[in-house]
Amino acid sequence: QLRERQYYDLRPFDHKALSDLAEQTIREKLSALAAHITEQVRKDEWVKASLRNSDIPSYNPSFTGRIDDLIAIRRDLALGVAGITTVVHGLGGIGKTELALAYAHAYAHTYPGGCSFVNCAGSQDWRTVLERLGDKKGWSYSDHIRSNVERHFSALVRSMHDHSSTEGRMLIVCDNVDEPALFSQSSISELRLQGDLIHELFTSRLEAKSRNDLSAVRWHALDELEIYEATQLLEELVG
């Protein structure tokens, strides 16, 4: 036992092993850095593409709170379920449009195809909505196509898909929708949404009328601001 306690296993120090370990650590750090830079460059390119393709109104610097609502909307839109759209609904003046715009600005880097804002008040069908979108995007068609409602609608849908396929995922903010038919599954199916290239975010005072509506739309009820959020907003407005 005394021999075991006094025994020391002395070996020559392996400088090469230490050097190899340091080199491996450096390589791992460089690899992680390269991956980080690549990701940042990719996001930067997406942001530039989004700015080039977007016509969304400017961000409201007074926007405050609603973090949970933004997270919920992102969760719904990012599920990647074809044909599913999200509707922010609530009383007039409660902040539906501001929330939708805040979402568009917060996640613009994920929409290289751009974020478009379409005022849908008075729109009775998707052709009217897409016409307004097409005007913003500069889509033009011959008189032969425009003279026929079905041909014109098909051309608009095709232009929307061509844009997202070429430029990347796009967000369409459909503001102030007052026609329930736009939310129906049969109506949305006419857009032939597939994959995850087109996200639709609605604002409306309308309520979900039936379970059939829920199969095509995710409804997000917007309530009044919490007391602390309202206080923070007032403080920012009055300076």
Image (tube, rainbow, N blue to C red):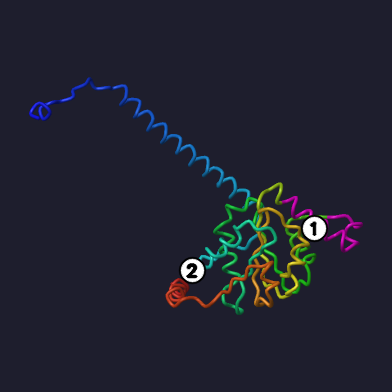
Residue closer to the observer: 225 or 52:
225
Could you tell me which residue is drawn at 35 percent across and 25 percent down? Answer: 20
> Callout 2 environment at 10 Å: few (<14), some (14 to 19), or many (20+)?
some
**What crowding class fits label 1: few (fewer than 14 Cα within 10 Å), some (14-19), or many (20 or more)?**
many
User: For this view, does 146 lie left or right of residue 239?
Assistant: right
Is 144 contained in the magenta span?
Answer: yes
- The quarter of the picture where the C terminus appears is bottom left
Query: Residue at 52% across / 40% down in the picture?
Result: 38
The secondary structure that most of the magenta stretch takes on is: helix
Vertically, is 138 above or below 65?
A: above
**CA distance separating discs 1 and 2:** 36 Å
Q: Quadrant of residue 186?
A: bottom right
* Residue 236 place in picture, x, y as percent: 45, 71
Name the spot of residue 110 as percent of width and height, x first. 59, 52
Mark before the other along the chain sequence, 1 or 2 = 2
Q: Mark 2 = which residue?
A: 64
Per the rendering, the mark at residue 38 is none
Left or right of 14: which side holds 127? right
